[in-house]
Image: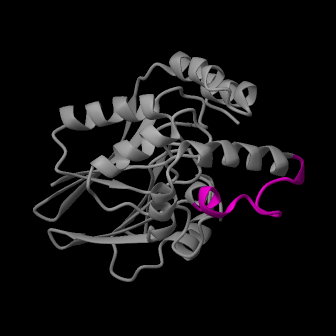
Amino acid sequence: MKIAFISDIHGNAIALDAVLQDIEQQGIDQIYVLGDICYRGPEPKRSLDLVRSLHTEVIKGNADEWVVRGVQKGEVADKVLELMNLERQWTVKQLEPTDIEYLESLPTTLNLTIEDVQLSAFHATPTSLFDVILPNADDNQIETSLMQAQGSQVFIYAHIHKPYIRYINGKVIMNIGSVGLPFDGLTKASYGLVEVEDGHIKTSIRRVNYDFERIVALYHEVNYPNAEMMSKVIRTAKI
């Protein structure tokens, strides 16, 4: 059983196209989506439509919550709060009311059993859409914050846009990175693979080329409110 976990598309449908093509080439049996579908990219509607066309389980990310109710004080730095809400308003204008309802209705955790192997997946942590657990966090912080589900052998999350895989006390913790907005300096879309066969587990990160200059052009073509900054992030894969 080969399972792909994708997340943090952020309205970058071109990167999502490339990832879905790679997933098809890899012979994946199932795809799951860990949130942050529309916000901060030039194609929020197409990104959401692509995700919904997968007919799979999708969970909510912090950016999905922001699309639903706006960015609130204390969730980002005060100096960018107004601008990020302008971005949110632009995003909402590209969507249908039913799209907003869909995002609002998404669950926040995903628990799977694949051939007797239990997997726990969430966007940021099992109890928060916003908490940040970085790759260099110590083992105790990762265990306390992320590895809460009793019986799970694999823990999968997104949110930080920096993919990694670690092993703690015989269990796997994997961050799958970002499809549309990587922050680790590599301008390639990222997603996670979990393969389970006869109780054996294999985890890996896939990095996929996509036309990031086309995304930069699209930010300007659609008059995105924060096109210059977002273009720089796309081109450098850093924030």
* Residue 171 on the magenta segment: no
| The N terminus - image quarter | bottom left
Verify whether residue 69 appears in magenta. yes
The residue at 82%/51% (across/down) is: 81
Q: Residue at x 52, y 59 (%)?
A: 100
Depicted 154 relative to depicted 116: above or below: above
Foreground pick, 89 / 141: 89
- The residue segment tinted magenta is 65-79
Q: Residue at x 56, y 54 (%)?
A: 159
**Residue ranking furthest to the left:** 198
Q: Position of residue 140 (x, y in %)?
A: 59, 72
- Left or right of 184? Residue 26 is left
Instruction: Indicate the quadrant where residue 47 lies.
Output: top left
Q: Nearer the viewer, residue 182 or 174?
A: 182
Judge by depth and name the residue closer to the eye, 29 or 56: 56
Asked if residue 89 lies left or right of residue 128, the reply is right
Q: Nearer the viewer, residue 147 or 62?
A: 62
Relative to 188, is 145 above or below?
below
Residue 20, by quadrant, is top left
Image point (73%, 58%), residue name: 71
Question: Given the current orientation, which residue lies at the most extreme right position?
Answer: 79
Question: Residue 6 at what x, y percent from top left?
Answer: 39, 48
